[in-house]
Image (cartoon, coloured by chain):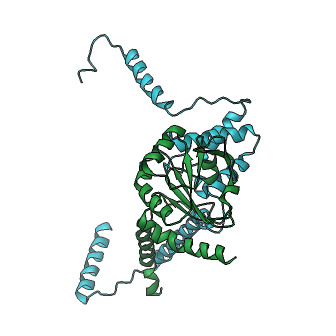
Amino acid sequence: MQSNSRPGLGLLKQVGLFLLLLSSSAVAVEDVVSFSDESLRPRYQQLLEELRCPKCQNQNLADSNSAISQDLRAEVQRLLEQDLSDAEIKEYLKNRYSEFILYRPEVNSATWFLWAAPVVLVVLGGLIVLRLSRRKKTDGTEETPIAVRSTDQQQRLDELLNRSKQGSE
Amino acid sequence: MNRLTLFIPFALCLALGAFLFFSLGKDPLDLPSALVGEPFPEFALEELHEPERQVSTDDFDGQVLLVNVWATWCFACRIEHPWLNSLAKDGVVIVGLNYKDHRKLAQDWLQERGDPYQFSIFDPRGVLGIDLGVYGAPETYLVDAQGIIRHRRVGVVDERVWNGEFRDLYQQLVDEANAE
């Protein structure tokens, strides 16, 4: 509360300071990389996003600053400079670090279920919803069957129904 | 509707629960190795103690051996080192792969703690490391007489790990090599 009302620090300055804080964290893990051809840079960034750090799991090569990630970033850069295609670079690393290194797993006998599951679940869910809604519709037209209804209850129900009918007329 | 179909969601939950439960014990650091069953990657690097000597897979010489990836900066390597020394004393051939390290530090380290390695590959930039898919130290590879990697252990190899994962396979490979 106090800092908000402190005199002398205008809103513009406060916003400026805040922005400074943001910018310093954004560049924390970026190496300085130079390419012979600047057109390689977007491909480099893309690959680092899609390759996984084998040591610090759940981070990609772009996020991680572990020693092995630094090495693998340098390796990706070296391979890019050697004119390898993205697919070839992924293959190269996969042959060494296994499929684990690919954040986007390939479709094969072990992973097809992973890829098919969303489609299967959506179709399955759709079928269930369709079936439920259809049943509701047919149920609505029929009289709701109530299994246990004593004669007393039936009598009371008739009375109530008659009363409301009379009331509305 | 058949009453049994009402149990389908329950059965699915049970199956999911079982799957998750059995996944609990799995070590997420235990990655599948791309190189088991593949030949040990070719390399040409300096020997740790003799900088003028180049070593390669030819120096494996058709022996069944262990390749142990280690470094002086690796704390767990200190823990497994005594066991490697005792394996070497029992006649197991071990080749050292000094990974991303300084030559002098590594030499002193071996001087101090004993050198179980038949020879040591010096890989200061980790080039062989990348070809092997190394992502930390220590790692240990069991290589057969044909130069094929037969087993890989990420982490410490101590007596328990040796007896559990290596000993029988190692003995089998040695017997096969002797039979030929």
Dividing the picture into quarters, in which one does residue B49 lie? top right
Decide if residue B102 is in sight here. no
* Whole-percent x, y for residue A82 in the image: 75, 40
* Whole-percent x, y for residue B64 in the image: 61, 66
Q: Residue at x 66, y 41 (%)?
A: B52
Q: Quadrant of the C terminus of chain A?
A: bottom left
Foreground of the two, A122 or A151 = A122
> Vertical placement of A45 versus B83: above or below?
above
Foreground of the two, A106 or B98 = B98
Outermost right residue: A83
Decide if residue B127 is in sight here. yes
* Whole-percent x, y for residue A45 in the image: 63, 38
Shade of chain B as shown in the rendered figure? green
Dividing the picture into quarters, in which one does residue A8 lie? top left
**On the rendered structure, is B70 left or right of B53?**
left
* Whole-percent x, y for residue B44 in the image: 69, 47
Foreground of the two, A109 or A149 = A109
Outermost top residue: A8
Outermost bottom residue: A151
> Vertical placement of B8 versus B69: above or below?
below
> Vertical placement of B159 versus A21: above or below?
below
Which chain is rendered cyan in the image? A
**On the rendered structure, is B161 left or right of A120?**
left
Dividing the picture into quarters, in which one does residue B118 lie? bottom right
Foreground of the two, A59 or B34 = B34
Q: Residue at x 24, y 81 (%)?
A: A156
Query: How many labels, in total?
Result: 0
> Vertical placement of A96 versus B49: above or below?
below
Q: Quadrant of the N terminus of chain A?
A: top left
